[in-house]
Image (spheres, rainbow, N blue to C red):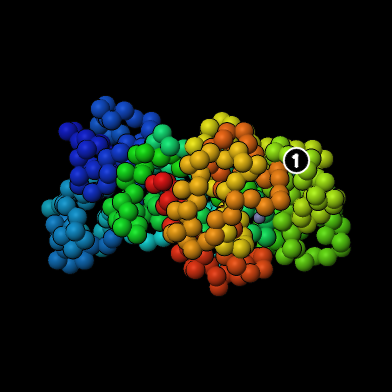
C-alpha cells in the first residue's frame, strides 16, 4: 500500500500508526533514505492493501476508522485530498486493510506460472522481499530467488530440483508466505517471534530449481519443437511423465555437481531420460549452473535442499561435513519426526558439492512418504512436518 509524505511525517510515524516494524518499512523503500523523505514522496507500507469503500449515510471518517481499529490519520494518509467535512454518500474512499491471510494457496497442482503469479503478489504486498533472477532454464524460464532479511547468517532453501517432486515448491512457498504474515502481523509461529530472525539471517529461497521439468510433469510436453518430440522420445514414447525427475533435456540436475561426479556416472549407467542421467560433464545444464553460481555468489552459511520422499534427512558427504552439522540435523529430526541419515551411496548432488567445497552444513530433506509425485492429500501433513525444519534452519 502506498502513502504520500506530508509535512512532518517520518517512517517512524508510519510504523507507529500502522503497527508495522520500522525495519520492514525501511526495507520496503530501499530507494529512499530514512532521514530524508520529502513531501509528496511515495512510501510503501508492507502488509496492507488500500481497498475502496463507498460512503454510507451516517459515516464519518472517525467512525470508519474506529470500526477497523485504525487511527483517523491512517485514512488521511491514503486519501490525501479528502475533506472530512464534505463526505458525500456514495463517494469512494480508500481504506487501509491489513493482510492477515495467505496469498499462496499451496494445496494445488503448482506449476511454474502459479509460482510466478504468487511471487508477484507477495512482492506487491511485501516489498521488503527481493526476487532477483538466479538464471534461466533450458526453455528460457527465469529461475527466481527470493531474499528475506538482513542478517549475517546466510541460509538457503531450495525445492523442485527433481521435476516429480514439485510438491516441495508449494510447501516452501507456503512457509515463505507464513514468514511474511508473521512479520507484518507481529504474530509468532509456533511461539517463535520472527522479527529477531529477520535481523539475524538472510534467507535465500529458490522455490523451483527445475521449472521446465515441473511443467512437464504437471502440464505435459512443451508446445515448442524440438523439445516436444525429443522429450517424448526420451520417455520411451510415453506421454505419462509422472516418473520424470530430470530437466527437459533428460539430465538429472541433482547428479550434476562436481563432487565425485565420476563415481555417480559409474553408478548410474543410463543415457538421457526420466532420471539418474548425470549429463555429459558436471554442470552442463543451465539450471545446475545457475544454482552453482548463486551458491558461490551468496557464500551461504548452510543449505537445505527439499526433495520427496522418505521422511529422512541426509547430512553427510565423505566425512567432510563440519561438526556443527550433527546437532543441527538432530534438531531437524526432533521437530519433524524425520530420521537423520549420514550418508548413502550417492554422489554429485547439490548438498554433496556444498559440503565438499565449503565444509559447511548441507542437507537433503526428503519430505513425505509414498510414491512420487506425492498426492496433494499429503500436503497439510508435509507442511506441518517441514515447518519445524524451516524454522530450525533459521534459529539454529
Ligand atoms: Zn529428489
Nearer to us in this view, 68 or 156:
156
The x and y percentages for residue 128 are 39, 41
Residue 110, quarter of picture: bottom right
Nearer to us in this view, 106 or 191:
191
Residue 108, quarter of picture: bottom right
The residue depicted at 62 percent of the width and 33 percent of the height is 357
- Vertical placement of residue 273 versus 11, above or below: below
Q: Which residue in the structure is indicated by mark 1?
A: 261
* Residue 215 seen in this snapshot: no
The residue depicted at 69 percent of the width and 47 percent of the height is 254
Residue 162, quarter of picture: bottom right
* Residue 67 seen in this snapshot: yes
The x and y percentages for residue 11 are 25, 37
Is residue 139 left or right of 208 when viewed as pictured? right
The residue depicted at 73 percent of the width and 39 percent of the height is 260
- Vertical placement of residue 76 versus 167, above or below: above
The x and y percentages for residue 127 are 40, 43
The residue depicted at 49 percent of the width and 58 percent of the height is 333
Amino acid at each position: 500500500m502506498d502513502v504520500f509524505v506530508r509535512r512532518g511525517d517520518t517512517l517512524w510515524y508510519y510504523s507507529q500508526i500502522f503497527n508495522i516494524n520500522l525495519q520492514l518499512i525501511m526495507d520496503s523503500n530501499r530507494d529512499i533514505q530514512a532521514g530524508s523523505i520529502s513531501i509528496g514522496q511515495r512510501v510503501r507500507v508492507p502488509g496492507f492493501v488500500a481497498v475502496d469503500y463507498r460512503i454510507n449515510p451516517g459515516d464519518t471518517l472517525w467512525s470508519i476508522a474506529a470500526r477497523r481499529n485504525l487511527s483517523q490519520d491512517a485514512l488521511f494518509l491514503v486519501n490525501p485530498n479528502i475533506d472530512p467535512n464534505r463526505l458525500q454518500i456514495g463517494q469512494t474512499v480508500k481504506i487501509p486493510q491489513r493482510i492477515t491471510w495467505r496469498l499462496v494457496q499451496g494445496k494445488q497442482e503448482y506449476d511454474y506460472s502459479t509460482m510466478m503469479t504468487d511471487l508477484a503478489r507477495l512482492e506487491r504486498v511485501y516489498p521488503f522481499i527481493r526476487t532477483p533472477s538466479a538464471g534461466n532454464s533450458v526453455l528460457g524460464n527465469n529461475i527466481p530467488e527470493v531474499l528475506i532479511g538482513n542478517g549475517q547468517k546466510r541460509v538457503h532453501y531450495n525445492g523442485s530440483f527433481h521435476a516429480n517432486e514439485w510438491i516441495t515448491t508449494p510447501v516452501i512457498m507456503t512457509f515463505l508466505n507464513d514468514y511474511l504474515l508473521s512479520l507484518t502481523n507481529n504474530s509468532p509461529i509456533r511461539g517463535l517471534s520472527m522479527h529477531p530472525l529477520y535481523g539475524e539471517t538472510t534467507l535465500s529461497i529458490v522455490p523451483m530449481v527445475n521449472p521446465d521439468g515441473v511443467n512437464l510433469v504437471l502440464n505435459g510436453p512443451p508446445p515448442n519443437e524440438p523439445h516436444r518430440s525429443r522429450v517424448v522420445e526420451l520417455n520411451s514414447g510415453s506421454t505419462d511423465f509422472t516418473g520424470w525427475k530430470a530437466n527437459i533435456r533428460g539430465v538429472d540436475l541433482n547428479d550434476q555437481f562436481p563432487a565425485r561426479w565420476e563415481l555417480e556416472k559409474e553408478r548410474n549407467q543410463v543415457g538421457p531420460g526420466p532420471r539418474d542421467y548425470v549429463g555429459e560433464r558436471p554442470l552442463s545444464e543451465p539450471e545446475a549452473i545457475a544454482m552453482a553460481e548463486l551458491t558461490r555468489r551468496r557464500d551461504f552459511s548452510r543449505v537445505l535442499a527439499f526433495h520427496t520422499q522418505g521422511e529422512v534427512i541426509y547430512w553427510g558427504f565423505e566425512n567432510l561435513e563440519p561438526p556443527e552439522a550433527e546437532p543441527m540435523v538432530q534438531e531437524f529430526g526432533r521437530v519433524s519426526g524425520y530420521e537423520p541419515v549420514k550418508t548413502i551411496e550417492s554422489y554429485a548432488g547439490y548438498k554433496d558439492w556444498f559440503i565438499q567445497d565449503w565444509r559447511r552444513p548441507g542437507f537433503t530433506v526428503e519430505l513425505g512418504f509414498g510414491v512420487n509425485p506425492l498426492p496433494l492429500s499429503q500436503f497439510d501433513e508435509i507442511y506441518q512436518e517441514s515447518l519445524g525444519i524451516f524454522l530450525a534452519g533459521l534459529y539454529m
